[in-house]
Image (cartoon, grey):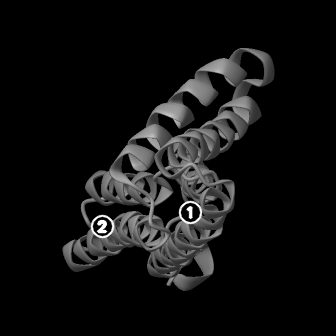
Amino acid sequence: DAIQGEKPLTPLATAALTLFILVLLIGLFITVFGLPGSLLIFLAALLYAVATGFSPLGFPTIMALLLLALIAEGLEFLLGMWGAHHAAASRRGLAAAGVGGVAGMMALTPWLYGPGALIGLFAGAFTGVWITEMIRQWNLKSAFRAEPRAILGWTTGSLVRGALTVGMTVVILITIYS
């Protein structure tokens, strides 16, 4: 701001800052879909820090953001596995969830594009676990009982990761604009 004695931003700097903020928002958005938005936000902050000579975002801030991104992704993974473990899902069931998720994405993406990939991921993973647990236990009731616990673990992990991702974005914007 010229009033505080700073030079106004050049058009190129304004465009770069706008692009940076858009990437932060994209990082927040893709976190909702289970993609690693915290890592995208960290990489954007790192690139911004390098481009500005670590002026507003210093090395300690970048290291804190890296730590937050790793904690966010790690906790999401661990809580998801905790939910699956307490749901008594077998290793075959977890593997079937991965295979089913990929197969579901491949099956629905050509027809529904982005939403098809997301729907296919969840539907395929659910179907893979359910079929595997049905075959393993031959019991419809216990196969359906395993799913809510696994979903609870995954949802809790996603919420924690989302909160940390929002926190990272707030820290970046406060640091840049203060």
Q: Amino acid at mark 1?
A: Pro
What is the secondary structure assignment of the residue under circle 1? loop
Q: Is residue 175 left or right of residue 62?
A: right
Q: Which is in the foreground here, disc 1 or disc 2? A: 2
Residue 4 makes an appearance in the image: yes
Residue at 50 percent across and 66 percent down: it is: 7
What is the secondary structure assignment of the residue under circle 2? helix
Q: Is residue 117 left or right of residue 168?
A: right
Q: Who is closer to the viewer here, 110 or 126?
A: 126
Locate residue 16, reporting x and y percent.
Answer: 52, 46
Residue at 56 percent across and 63 percent down: it is: 8
Q: Who is closer to the viewer here, 28 or 150?
A: 150
For residue 8, the mark is: 1
Pointer 1 or 2: first along the chain:
1
For the N terminus, the image quarter is bottom right
Residue at 37 percent across and 60 percent down: it is: 42
Residue designated by label 2: 70
Q: Is residue 161 left or right of residue 52?
A: right
The crowd level at tag 2 (other Cα within 10 Å; few <14, some 14-19, many 20+) is: some
Locate residue 78, reporting x and y percent.
Answer: 36, 69
Q: Is residue 143 left or right of residue 60?
A: right
Locate residue 157, reporting x and y percent.
Answer: 50, 71
- Is there a contact, CB below 8 Å, between mark 1 and mark 2? no
